[in-house]
Image (spheres, grey):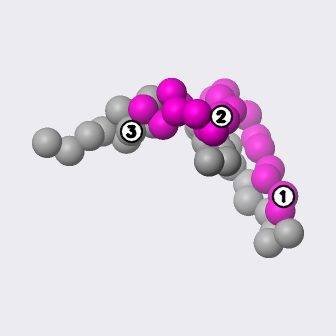
Amino acid sequence: MEKSTKDITDELLQREGIAHLNIEPYEKVTITTGQGEQHFTGPAIIIVNQD
């Protein structure tokens, strides 16, 4: 049986070394790195894996 994206996300969020941001509907976010910019509009969950 395949896991849903929600189940995988919930599992990741419980792990050590994981940070996340909840982006509300219609909220705009820009992530800037040395490689450029990415633009997103919520709803979204941004997951950062620093493990």
Q: Which mark is residue 46?
A: none
Q: Nearer the viewer, residue 31 or 51?
A: 51
Query: Is 45 included in the stretch rendered in magenta?
Result: no
| Residue 5 on image: x %, y % | 37, 41
Q: Which mark is residue 32?
A: 1
The local secondary structure at tag 2 comes to strand
| Residue 8 on image: x %, y % | 39, 38
Q: Residue at x 80, y 72 (%)?
A: 35
The disc labelled 3 sits on which kind of residue? Ile
The disc labelled 1 sits on which kind of residue? Thr
User: In the rendered structure, which segment of residues is drawn in magenta?
Assistant: 11-33
Q: Residue at x 63, y 39 (%)?
A: 17
Residue neighbourhood size for the residue with mark 3, other residues' Cα within 10 Å, grouped as few (<14), some (14–19), many (≥20): few
Q: Is residue 23 visible?
A: no
The quadrant the N terminus occupies is: top left
Q: Are marks 3 and 1 in contact (CB under 8 Å)?
A: no
Q: Residue furthest left?
A: 1
Q: Read off the residue under disc 2.
A: 20
The disc labelled 2 sits on which kind of residue? His
Q: Read off the residue under disc 3.
A: 8
